[in-house]
């Protein structure tokens, strides 16, 4: 029987609503929010790296520190604290790991979330969707991949590569990637799909029940 022992979450647009960050980028670039958001959405739809938005806007890649942005509790989606609190109470090991700058590790730690793992691509020198990133999660938690549920808003960077290394995965449909990726044919390969983190316990029950 499969037993899920840990739940690991992507950061941007899974735990953290990045609207305030991208609005800060638009202000730095001197363009309206709507302009930057539209270009960003177009890149996602074309399956291009969203960081191309910086060259299109003719600005350098923006380090959050340059524009004075850091993640705060107000940036968390409303379901984050209640869901993580419940999962922690139920005995699950919790973590966050995403493609972020190293400063995000400290910012997430300052939010008081019950995270045993708080990792970034910059800190590890590994980026999703590299399978090594997901193997590193398992190594850090000292668990087998099949004992871990990874939750993310992207099929290409989160869900499919997690499944590829033997983890369980849940796709959350929110944020620009979540909504656009929900139209991809690859979604048919994903058994567990949610719209709220509060559904994670149901996903765990389904995984364990199926096994």
Image: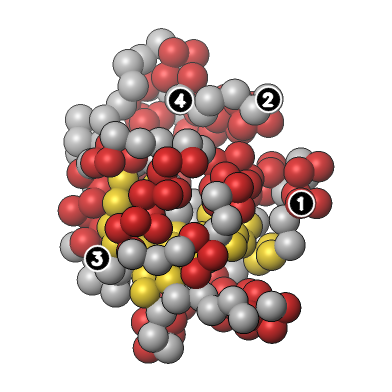
| Crowd tier of the residue under label 3, counting other residues whose Cα lies within 10 Å: few below 14, some 14–19, many 20 or above | some
Q: CA distance from mark 1 to mark 4?
A: 27 Å
Mark found first going from the N terminus, 1 or 3: 3
Residue 135 is situated, as x and y percent measured from the top left of the image, at 42, 49
State left or right for residue 181 relative to residue 2: right
Residue at the location (44% across, 13% down)? Answer: 55
Q: Nearer the viewer, mark 1 or mark 3?
A: 1
Mark found first going from the N terminus, 2 or 3: 2
Image quarter (top left, top right, bottom left or bottom right) of the C terminus: bottom right
Q: Which residue is mark 3?
A: 111
| Crowd tier of the residue under label 2, counting other residues whose Cα lies within 10 Å: few below 14, some 14–19, many 20 or above | few
Q: CA distance from mark 1 to mark 3?
A: 34 Å
* In the depicted structure, whether residue 135 falls above or below residue 197: above
Q: Which residue is mark 2?
A: 46
| Crowd tier of the residue under label 4, counting other residues whose Cα lies within 10 Å: few below 14, some 14–19, many 20 or above | few
Residue at the location (41% across, 43% down)? Answer: 133
Q: Which residue is mark 4?
A: 51
Q: Could you tell me if the residues under marks 1 and 3 are in contact, i.e. CB atoms within 8 Å? A: no
**Which quadrant of the structure image shows residue 81?**
bottom left
- The local secondary structure at tag 1 comes to helix
| Residue 189, numbered label | 1
Q: Could you tell me if the residues under marks 1 and 4 are in contact, i.e. CB atoms within 8 Å? A: no
| Crowd tier of the residue under label 1, counting other residues whose Cα lies within 10 Å: few below 14, some 14–19, many 20 or above | few
- The local secondary structure at tag 3 comes to loop
- The local secondary structure at tag 4 comes to loop
Q: Is residue 72 visible?
A: no
Mark found first going from the N terminus, 4 or 3: 4
Observer-nearest of 104 and 32 = 104
Q: Nearer the viewer, mark 2 or mark 1?
A: 1
Q: CA distance from mark 2 to mark 4?
A: 13 Å
**Which quadrant of the structure image shows residue 142?**
bottom left
């Amino acid at each position: 029987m499969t037993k899920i022992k840990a739940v690991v979450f992507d950061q941007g647009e899974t735990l953290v609503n990045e609207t305030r960050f991208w609005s800060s980028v638009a202000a730095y670039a001197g363009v309206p929010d709507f302009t930057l958001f539209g270009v960003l959405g177009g890149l996602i739809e074309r399956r291009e790296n969203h960081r191309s938005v910086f060259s299109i806007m003719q600005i350098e890649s923006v380090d959050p520190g340059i524009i004075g942005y850091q993640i705060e509790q107000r940036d968390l989606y409303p379901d984050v604290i209640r869901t993580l609190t419940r999962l922690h109470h139920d005995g699950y090991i919790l973590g966050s790991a995403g493609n972020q700058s190293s400063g995000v590790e400290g910012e997430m730690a300052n939010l008081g979330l019950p995270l045993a793992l708080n990792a970034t691509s910059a800190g590890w020198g590994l980026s999703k969707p590299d399978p090594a990133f997901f193997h590193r999660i398992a190594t850090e938690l000292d668990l087998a991949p099949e004992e871990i549920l990874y939750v993310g808003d992207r099929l290409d960077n989160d869900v499919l590569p997690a499944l590829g290394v033997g983890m369980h995965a849940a796709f959350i449909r929110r944020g620009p990637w979540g909504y656009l990726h929900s139209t991809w044919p690859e979604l048919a390969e994903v058994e567990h799909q949610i719209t709220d983190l509060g559904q994670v316990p149901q996903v765990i029950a389904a995984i364990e029940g199926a096994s």
